């Protein structure tokens, strides 16, 4: 039944004519009455619950709903489509409809055709479903494209089939409204036949995307490359990335690190990735604190927090945990200061000379600051700071005479260049004035005097 036929009957049809069971009729009344704003149904959930399915109203109570066939689910979808207050929609597989002649695919598609018109749902959850080779997602084309409120898409333990990933990529990539903040594609390893490259790539134009969950999907090389490209060369502002049980190893970390180095990411979850060795944790350690130079330490990542480091990890895992403790401090300037003071015995002050005399008071103030972390205010740490301060001041004072001479000579050279440039400009302007005067006189004398020019 098409939308026009539903519209023609919607005002007159009784729920008793749609569903046989009382509990189904009650649910239909609730969803239908929501159209007029008489109640607010925050969450509609269609899931297996003992012998049937249930619709959950998180504000009031839970009401069972057992799909009876294509017709009742079509009407339920129609009412959801017209609903202006529904925030969350959960859909779960394993249905046993009363109408044995109807397939699960027929029933879910009749429901989704109505849902396609909804514009209020913020969170769409699809769990343990056969996506019918992507037909479930293509049926919701207009829902994905025009729902200005959709923020979260959650697909867990689903059978994508041959065209599921492509259909999801088109659904997300075709959105004209860029409201997505969170995408969960989890635990679908055995059913993702063509990989998630297209899906990951389709998220590149969503500037509000902050959370991505890919747990439980064993990612291949091209998917790791797509993920690195998404973080490094897209408009997204990812803050949280879940990569537990994705098959990450040392090579995958190496591929991902360039994208993590100036990234907006604040939390990355790496639980149950047994292929990561001490080499991989060392790479993360260098990301958080590159000690090759003072400037490299300053430019290291002071924001990222890594979850899921195994307790049995060797030396670099232990050192990495210490850096992660630092990265939790809100003042990132302080984090940089502590890392520099901790991992550099003496400072090379030469790079700071270009700041001229302004650097000395800044340096003294920097060393006198007390850390907000008690563990970095102890006697040993204060002694190290005092030693570094004296060494840096000594280098600065020792280098100042040469710095002063160089500065004076450079200034004198710049003044000479400026004067020469000014003289060239004046000479050129005078020459042009004389040429113009010459042409004016020649014109007044006439052609017979042209040879004089």
Image: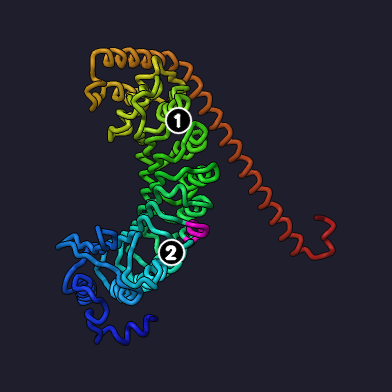
Q: Secondary structure at mark 1?
A: loop
Given residues 86 and 77, the one toward you in this image is 77
Residue 57: % across, % down? 20, 63
Residue under circle 2? 137
- Mark 1 near mark 2, Cβ–Cβ under 8 Å? no
In the image, 376: left or right of 349? left
Alpha carbon separation for disc pair 1 and 2: 35 Å
Front-lying residue, 223 or 358: 223
Q: Which is more toward the observer, 338 or 221?
A: 221
Residue bearing the label numbered 1: 276
Residue at image coords 40%, 51%? 185
- Chain part drawn in magenta: 161-167
Q: Residue at x 51, y 50 (%)?
A: 195
Tell whether position 404 is magenta: no
Q: Is residue 24 left or right of residue 174?
A: left
Residue 238 horizontal/vertical position (percent): 39, 46
Identify the image quadrant of residue 299: top left
Query: Badge 2 local density, few (<14 within 10 Å), some, or many (20+)?
Result: many
Seen in the picture, residue 99 relative to 217 is either above or below; the reply is: below
Q: Residue furthest left?
A: 60
Q: Quadrant of residue 426?
A: top right
Quadrant of res 322? top left
- The reply to whether residue 82 is visible in this rendering is no
Residue 89 locus on image (x, y percent): 30, 62
Which is nearer the eye, 445 or 388?
Answer: 388
Q: Looking at the image, is mark 1 or mark 2 earlier in the sequence?
A: 2
Question: Where's the C terminus, which quadrant?
Answer: bottom right
SS at mark 2 in the image: helix
Please determine whether, in this image, residue 240 is positioned above or below residue 384: below
């Amino acid at each position: 039944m098409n939308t026009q036929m539903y519209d023609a009957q919607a005002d007159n049809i009784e729920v008793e004519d749609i569903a046989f069971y009382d509990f189904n009729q009650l649910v239909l009344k609730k969803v239908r009455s929501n159209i007029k704003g008489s109640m607010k149904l925050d969450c509609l959930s269609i899931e297996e619950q003992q012998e049937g399915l249930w619709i959950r109203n998180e504000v009031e109570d839970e009401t069972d709903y057992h799909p009876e066939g294509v017709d009742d689910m079509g009407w339920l979808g129609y009412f959801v489509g017209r609903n202006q207050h529904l925030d969350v929609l959960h859909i779960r597989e394993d249905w046993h409809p009363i109408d044995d002649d109807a397939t699960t695919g027929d029933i879910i598609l009749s429901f989704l055709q109505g849902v396609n018109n909804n514009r209020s749902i913020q969170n769409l959850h699809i769990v343990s479903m056969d996506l019918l080779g992507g037909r479930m997602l293509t049926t919701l084309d207009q829902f994905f494209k025009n729902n200005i409120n959709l923020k979260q898409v959650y697909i867990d333990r689903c059978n994508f089939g041959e065209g599921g990933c492509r259909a999801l990529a088109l659904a997300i990539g075709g959105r004209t409204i860029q409201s997505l903040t969170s995408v969960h594609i989890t635990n679908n390893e055995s059913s993702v036949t063509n990989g998630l490259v297209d899906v990951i790539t389709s998220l590149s134009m969503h500037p509000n995307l902050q959370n991505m969950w890919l747990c439980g999907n064993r990612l291949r090389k091209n998917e790791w490359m797509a993920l690195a490209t998404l973080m490094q060369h897209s408009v997204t502002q990812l803050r949280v990335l879940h990569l537990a049980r994705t098959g990450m190893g040392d090579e995958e970390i190496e591929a991902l690190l360039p994208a993590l180095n100036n990234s907006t990411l604040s939390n990355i979850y790496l639980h149950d990735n047994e292929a990561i060795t001490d080499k991989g944790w060392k790479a993360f350690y260098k990301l958080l604190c590159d000690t090759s130079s003072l400037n490299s330490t300053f430019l290291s990542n002071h924001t990222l927090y890594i979850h899921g480091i195994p307790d049995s990890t060797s030396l670099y895992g232990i050192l990495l945990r210490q850096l992660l403790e630092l990265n939790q401090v809100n003042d990132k300037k302080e984090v940089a200061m502590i890392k520099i003071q901790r991992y550099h015995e003496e400072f090379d002050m030469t790079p700071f000379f270009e700041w001229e005399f302004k650097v000395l008071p800044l340096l003294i103030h920097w060393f006198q600051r007390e850390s907000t972390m008690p563990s970095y205010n102890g006697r040993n740490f204060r002694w190290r700071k005092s030693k570094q301060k004296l060494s840096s001041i000594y280098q600065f004072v020792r280098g100042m005479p040469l710095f002063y001479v160089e500065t004076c000579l450079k200034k004198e050279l710049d003044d000479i260049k400026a004067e020469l440039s000014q003289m060239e400009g004046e000479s050129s302007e005078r020459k042009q004035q004389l040429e113009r005067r010459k042409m004016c006189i020649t014109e007044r004398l006439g052609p017979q005097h042209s040879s004089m020019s």
